Amino acid sequence: MSAKTPSKLEKILSEGHLAVTSECGPPRGSNPQPIIDKAEMIKDHVDAINITDNQTSMTRMSSLAACIRLKLMGLEPVLQMVTRDRNRIALQSDILGAASFDINNILCLSGDHQSFGDNPKGQNVHDIDSMQLIQTVRLMRDEGKFLGGDDLDRPLEMFVGAAANPFADPFEIRVPRLAKKVAAGVEFIQTQCIYNLDKFEEWMKGVRERGLHEKCYILAGLTPMKSVGMARYMQKRVPGMDVPDEVIKRLQGVEKGKAAAEGIKMCVESIQRLKEVEGVAGFHIMAIEWEQKVPEIVEAAGLYPRPSVN
Amino acid sequence: MIVADKKPVEEIIEYLKNHTNILILGCNECVTVCEAGGQKEVQVLASALRMNAQKDGKDVNVDELTLERQCDHEYLEEIRDMIDQYDAVVSLACGVGVQFTAEKYPSTMIYPGVNTCFLGATEKRGLWTERCQGCGQCILATTGSICPVARCAKRLFNGPCGGSTAGKCEINPETECAWQLIVDRMKALDKLDQYENLCPIKDWSTDRAGGPRKVVREDVQQ
């Protein structure tokens, strides 16, 4: 696949390098410093940085504003956009705002339900869904048109991504769902956090059987476990998350105070194993409020230094 | 049918605190089936209001009546000769009935006696669940006759989100995942291949987004 946009992430993938992305959650306030500090910690070890869009429906600084902060630092943001909070007018408008700052990557999501966040009594929008957001961005980029049919005065140059969760149910629909996203125009995928590697590999087998890995780049999602408590929480409380008992047992089996180090080690081992899986084009390392560990993981996984592209 | 739920009696008592001659007006249609606003519920509410008035030492008259429907002129006309006796009516019909009664009798205060909830079905006595949001452009032909607009918490048109777990919705383990139901049914119909057809962006102008709606049928108008 050759690069179609100025996205650095797309160039790295199209040149056949294993890409590395990470994410930063914007602050719950108006101080931009936390996003700058987080980005400084990881910028030399990743190719692009996702900025989450009010993740888990907790109200935060807007993903677009935080992406602009990264852009001002000369970094490569991936703008996450959920369809929960904006209708098609607001989505297109924010996409244009991002494009005006030459933000060249977008991740199209439906978003966590608002009942998980700080405004459970709020309305949700869902005017369009994540597949239709993918189609919208492709329309604005490839045909230079608004959904309403009018022409854009300057088309977008955005590399279009989406999420995939190989672990959610019904499992049999998970490869077809990716096929549908590919048909909608998705170009890269960042997956849900992978702890059940066997199941991920089974999903990838289905992906390869349909040749989908040749139509989009698949970045395997990883989140290092900080503690046994976190692993238990993810297993029991986070919908669509598949944390096998062995993961918890392994964290329990180390000396007190060493669980976090074991979590990092497990994350690195997962990357090593997944590097061998045909169709895995890179890694999306989501170290939740633990960004300082990203460089260590990237280096230990043999993914450093990052390639430079023109 | 339109499913409603009872309002707390304290809320109704608060509405009525300055009224002394009250009609509790039930409806014999949907709200009777969902046991929120039929003759039986009219009796129960009227008794509660009388007891409350007695407790407070107030002289309050509470009458009871249940109409066949409150969403048709024909039945609402039945109270024309008596409505002026009352300084307040509590309608136990859905929000349609409350408003239609109010439109017909502009000088009488009409209070809602139920919370109108959704278009749904009786799964069993005491359990009513939503099936339709009246979006005005039915897509059930493409979704295995199961509606993602009404039954998916994110009204997703193109498949289950990443939170679908063991057939349940991410927002509540007691809520079925609409897309699990759709997939199961399409599989049973041997039509699962249709899942991969992309559902086009919906025209919401026939939904509430387009403002108050009407259906005009000149062919049946007199």
Image (cartoon, coloured by chain):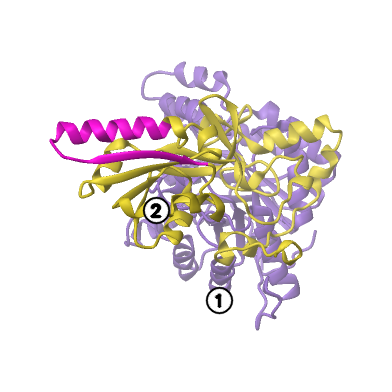
Chain colours: A purple, B yellow
Residue B94 picture location, percent across and down? 48, 46
Residue A292 picture location, percent across and down? 42, 45
Q: Which residues are magenta?
A: B41-67
The amino acid type of the residue labelled 2 equals Thr
Q: Is residue A258 magenta?
A: no
Between the C-alphas of marks 2 and 1, the distance is: 24 Å
Answer left or right for B67 relative to B164. left
User: Could you tell me which chain the residue with mark 2 belongs to?
Assistant: A
Neighbour class for label 1 at 10 Å: few (<14), some, many (≥20)? few
In the rendered image of this protein, does residue A227 appear above or below residue A67?
above
Disc number for residue A228? none
In the rendered image of this protein, does residue B152 appear above or below residue A254?
below
Answer left or right for A45 relative to B18. right
Question: Can residue A293 be seen from the camera position used here?
Answer: no
Q: Is residue B56 magenta?
A: yes
Q: Residue furthest bottom?
A: A153
Helix, strand or loop for disc 2: loop
Q: Nearer the viewer, residue A98 or B185?
A: B185
Point out the tag, 2 or 1, that comes first from the N-terminus. Answer: 2
Residue A237 picture location, percent across and down? 48, 30
- According to the picture, the residue beneath numbered tag 2 turns out to be A59
